[in-house]
């Protein structure tokens, strides 16, 4: 559906508002953190969360711009923005998400066969099936093309052996999209992109506990796992191109729309609680006040840039290398924000457990620690800078000049 405005968009706004008011459980509006935790699979769904998930999945509005033919909302970009605005006004968070929505689904819509789209997309749209990513390995992180997980051709199927690491949410996932080596004689050109079930024999998952106290990442061991040939996405030995496209979708979700913590405006409000106000009602510490304002400006500038990029990309083929700029900018702003929060909390920002610290203070510490990984996952800052220098600035690749 093409973008439109004026009376048509006003009519859609009224339709969206009416549907949301009738279908969004009001109890969830008071617990947006709980909605986010449920979305990530960190908690069991409450009755209202399950109801909201079923309703949004059936409507297709968890994936608003995806084709209606596969269960998506079939909305235009303008309509999707209106829907997002109306959801925000009610305190509603989309219950449909994860890697299926943010990464694999958009990639499959571009590279998958019609049979694959019909098979996998509807279950992503409804949130029925959770996906995880099998890319990094113990010896292949930033140099991902060095991966060694092997897929042997056995006629009607591949036999996969190897291991993956930092597999986010593997302990909750039903399916995995995975890079495997199908040709040992080539590096990038010997990699294929396959999908398979996480519940079959030969798949072993071991969560990794991080310094923040949680276990969002896992080790995944793959031993003699059978993968049907029809589970190959894209051409044989052409998985590197599919993976690069998927990573652009991943980075587009790290560009300021997924920032952690409270809003920039709230940062100053909370700072006053710990640092105090001057006679005019402003934050007493002028240096801290300046740095908070600079962070607010950076965050707002990033949000506007993301919006502009989305408008400029309208009608094009999706995310570009510009997502690398936005990913790095968002992580810098988010990490600075976390550090500022601990700074104005003082000794209350050093707690790990105990009644002397509020839940918000404990969460601030854990958020600060877990946020450090943002400079690495989705491609490290250095990898993004490489992409920016070569694909945006057109600088020579010095690693290939010797």
Image: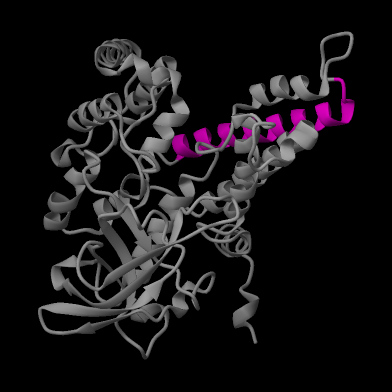
Tell me what residue is drawn at x 25 percent, y 28 percent.
Answer: 56
Q: How many marks?
A: 0
381 above or below 364?
A: below
Asked if residue 172 lies left or right of residue 68, the reply is right
- Is residue 1 visible in the rendered image? The answer is no
Quadrant in the picture for the C terminus: bottom right
Residue 343 drawn above or below residue 99: above
Q: Position of residue 6 (x, y in %)?
A: 35, 13
- Tell me the quarter of the picture where residue 155 sits: bottom left
The residues colored magenta run 284-312
**86 or 37: nearer the viewer:** 37
**How are the colours assigned in the image?**
one colour
Task: Give the residue drawn at x 63%, y 49%.
Answer: 369
In the rendering, at what x and y percent does residue 189 appear? 37, 79
Check residue 369 for magenta coloring.
Answer: no
Q: Quadrant of residue 24?
A: top left
Q: Position of residue 360 (x, y in %)?
A: 61, 30
The quarter of the picture where residue 159 lies is bottom left
């Amino acid at each position: 559906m093409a973008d439109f405005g004026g009376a048509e968009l006003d009519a859609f706004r009224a339709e969206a508002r009416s549907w949301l008011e009738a279908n969004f459980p009001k109890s969830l509006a008071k617990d947006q953190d709980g909605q986010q935790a449920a979305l990530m699979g960190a908690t069991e769904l409450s009755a209202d969360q399950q109801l909201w998930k079923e309703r949004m999945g059936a409507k297709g509005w968890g994936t608003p711009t995806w084709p209606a033919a596969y269960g998506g909302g079939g909305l235009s970009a303008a309509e999707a923005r209106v829907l997002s605005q109306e959801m925000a006004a009610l305190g509603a968070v989309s219950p449909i998400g994860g890697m299926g929505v943010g990464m694999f689904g958009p990639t499959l819509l571009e590279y998958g066969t019609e049979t694959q789209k019909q098979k996998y997309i509807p279950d992503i749209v409804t949130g029925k099936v959770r996906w995880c990513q099998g890319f990094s390995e113990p010896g292949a992180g930033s140099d991902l093309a060095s991966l060694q997980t092997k897929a042997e051709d056995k006629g009607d199927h591949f036999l996969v052996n190897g291991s993956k690491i930092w597999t986010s949410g593997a302990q909750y996932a039903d399916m995995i999209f995975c890079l495997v080596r199908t040709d040992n004689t080539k590096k990038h050109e010997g990699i294929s992109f396959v999908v398979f079930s996480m519940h079959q024999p030969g798949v072993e998952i071991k969560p990794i506990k991080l310094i923040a106290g949680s276990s969002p990442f896992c080790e995944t061991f793959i031993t003699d796992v059978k993968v049907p040939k029809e589970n190959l996405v894209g051409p044989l030995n052409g998985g590197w191109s599919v993976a690069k496209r998927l990573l652009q979708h991943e980075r587009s979700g790290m560009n300021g729309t997924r920032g952690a913590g409270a809003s920039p405006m709230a940062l100053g409000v909370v700072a006053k609680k710990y640092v105090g106000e001057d006679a005019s009602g402003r934050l007493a510490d002028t240096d801290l006040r300046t740095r908070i304002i600079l962070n607010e400006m950076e965050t707002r500038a990033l949000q506007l840039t993301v919006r502009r990029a989305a408008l400029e990309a309208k009608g094009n083929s999706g995310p570009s290398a510009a997502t690398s700029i936005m990913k790095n900018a968002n992580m810098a702003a988010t990490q600075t924000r976390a550090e500022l929060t601990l700074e104005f909390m003082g000794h209350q920002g050093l707690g790990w457990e105990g009644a002397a610290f509020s839940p918000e203070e404990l969460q601030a510490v854990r958020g600060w620690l877990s946020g450090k990984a943002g400079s690495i996952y989705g491609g490290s800052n250095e990898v993004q800078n490489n992409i920016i220098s070569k694909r945006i600035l057109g600088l020579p690749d010095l690693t290939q000049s010797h």
